[in-house]
Amino acid sequence: MGKSGLMQVRRGERWEAVWVAFRRSTLLAVLATLTLLGIHEGPRAWAGEAPAIESIQIGIEGVAKLGHWTPLRIALSGGERDHRCFLEIETVDGEGLPVIYEDASGDASFTLKAGQPLTVTRYYKPGRTDARIRLLLRDEGTKAILAEESFAADHLPSTVSFYLQLGRDLDVGRIEAYGPRDPARRVVARHVAHLELLPDDALGYDAVNAILVTTSADDALGKLSDNQRRALMEWVRRGGRIVLTVAEEAERLFAPSSPWAAWSPGSLAGVRDSFETTGLMRYAKAAQPLPPRIRASFLQIKSPRGQIVAFEGGGGLGDWPMLVRHAFGFGQVLVLLVDLDGKSLVDWLGAPRLMAKLLGLLDEGRGARAEDVQLASTAYSDISGQLRDALDLFSNVVLVHFSWIAGLVALYAMVIGPLEFAFWRWLRRPHGTWWTLPLWVVAFAGIAVVLSRGFKGKESRVNQVEIYDIDGASGAVRATVWAHLYSPDLRARDVILSTESLGDGVAVDEGTLTWHAVPGTRIGGMRGPTGMVVQSDAYRVAVRGVEGRLEGLPATVGSTKSLRARWQGKVTEDVADAARLTATRDGLLSGYFSNPLPVRLERVAIAYGGWLYRLPYDLEPQQRVDMRELAPLDLKWQLTRRRVVRRQDASLPWDPDDIEDLPRIVEMLMFYDAAGGLRYTRLRHEYQHFVDLSGHLHLQRAMLIGRVADPKATVEFSKKGEAPQLDRRLAVVRILWPVQPESEAKRD
């Protein structure tokens, strides 16, 4: 072979080697790409048929409200093999920032078996009406996405009143006509036909205002599962309101062995086959009459618990109670001693008004028909907005008003415009503006930076309000905490809810910590403009854990972030024996009480009925007080600061624009109804009305109120750098003790 032929062979071999190397590298690249896709997609790329999200049900009977915990009932189907999974719910908070809700309870993760269906319930808190929700099913080990679903939900305003009815369908939707015409405050009522869809956690009832249960035609309570029963009772215990209409099934429902015996209105004395309708007509104030006496079952009780709201007749001697209200934890149970679903009342035209009255829709003082009351000329109509503005006040931090910014912009335009033109024209050097314009830009930018740093400070600060409620009979505790963080710089923080403010004698069962926003269309409101939303990674909220937790909470420069926490637990100390209180015939308190907590209480008072007793000294741990030392004061007079001026009594008007007096705002949150409600404050208390325990003062319960002298930190912020400085802090304790009537105390 010649030299040229040998060169051609070698050249061909070289090109063949190059081609083989190219094919190998291409194959390796394809395999690497498929491997990366497999790692990203997880088992979906390898297991053939992957798990799937089949359907999603939002809220209860499709109703969900902004700013309230909402259940998501998720139907899943398994793939070709078993998976250990967990769910994440991604949406936005009240300010439009992305947030991920992850379950922190013991059943957060679950096994999705191959080819098997599974339904799980998770909870989230909607922040914006137009927000989309993204649901992610992840593998517990690899965190890979097994299935996902993105959808939009219709969230009602936070101030809409939502009522449920269990039992025979009474067409409860008819009560919506008694609600206000304002779409943001209207009434929504639903009958629950499929009881298996009710929540199995008390958190799921967060958006519900009250529940009506009938018992004679359909045993709705008996059809609930054990988890649903515990969830319903826990919701009432935490502050819910439930209405029972019971007569025929009373002995079975309130039997000592029944789980519902705690809701009994008193000692059962038998069931009669007829009753007078005078008391029922007076209570309902319905225009549609009833016969003076009708044949229907009527439950007779002795020694009624709590308050008799209405009697069978006109309330004279010998009349039996018709309607009884008593306390259950921090909630209320209202029992109507006739069957509203019976033949005699089910077709009564006045039944819708009676149901509306029973559910609290027509309560005086804060009733829905109070349009004649002029609302405050503020940016908010709910007292929660006044609390938020008060917590946004920080020492050494001056808010920059829009007028200041507008004035600085106007001055800048004046300087670089007509003043510059006139100055250089006078010097006959018009080109000189090319030298001075950059100087003016730098100067005004420097002024803005100096003002921003000078007014807004350089330290992170926190304002906090805490309300701790203790049931003196059972030792149950519920806590509500509002925390406002001011951040002078841009950083993300982890936030932990601490439960040590009352000392070591509290065992916590469950806690939640999350964002907080106010109702309405103002800036910062859940239906208002979000303003400038900074692009950030989604922060995480732990739901249904023992302690509340936020991870990666973002904060913009010179802004505040509002948080709210709630937790429930039990006091390990013996709270019940700390008080022995009785009521005289005049409704005054007698007996004694002491401070059962290991903390000192300041500005202590005890309230009962329409009376308030103030202590002139601080109350040390275990210190005992005899009621004979204290003088009774009119409670409403004290709340409204009423005084006698020139032989006339006049109360101090409530100023909705006053955000300086934080303790007074908190006092009104706790005793809104007792102070006169909407007619006194000209603000509504609908979004967080569970804080108001005024109604318990008339349910044979006394309430001790005091401020914690040296409270410990409640909300802890952890991140590199300095911890936020505690600026304004207010911690209030309320202890509810049962009060015996004087006759029963003598009998004991």
Image (tube, rainbow, N blue to C red):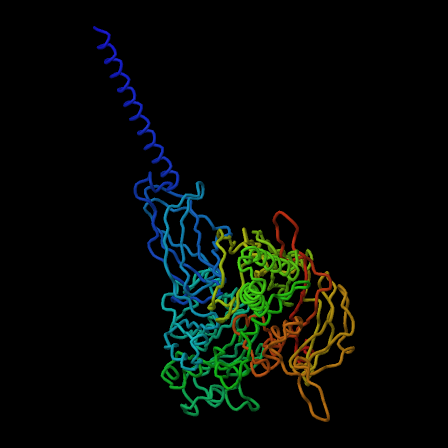
Between 730 and 352, the residue placed more toward the observer is 730
Extreme-bottom residue of the structure: 647
Q: Is residue 545 visible?
A: yes
User: Residue 128: x and y, percent?
Assistant: 45, 64
Q: Considering only vertical position in the picture, is 695 above or below 598?
A: below
User: Residue 659: x and y, percent?
Assistant: 63, 72
User: Residue 242: x and y, percent?
Assistant: 49, 72
Between 64 and 257, the residue placed more toward the observer is 64
User: Residue 531: x and y, percent?
Assistant: 49, 63
Look at the image and tell me in which quarter the C terminus lies. bottom right
**Residue 642 falls left or right of residue 120:** right
Q: Quadrant of residue 436?
A: bottom right
**Residue 281 falls left or right of residue 695:** left
Q: How many marks?
A: 0
**Residue 58 falls left or right of residue 596:** left
Q: Considering only vertical position in the picture, is 694 above or below 236?
A: below
Between 559 and 637, the residue placed more toward the observer is 559
Extreme-top residue of the structure: 1
Look at the image and tell me in which quarter the N terminus lies. top left
Residue for point 27% across, 23% down: 19
Q: Quadrant of residue 728?
A: bottom right
Q: Quadrant of residue 49?
A: top left
Q: Is residue 468 visible?
A: no
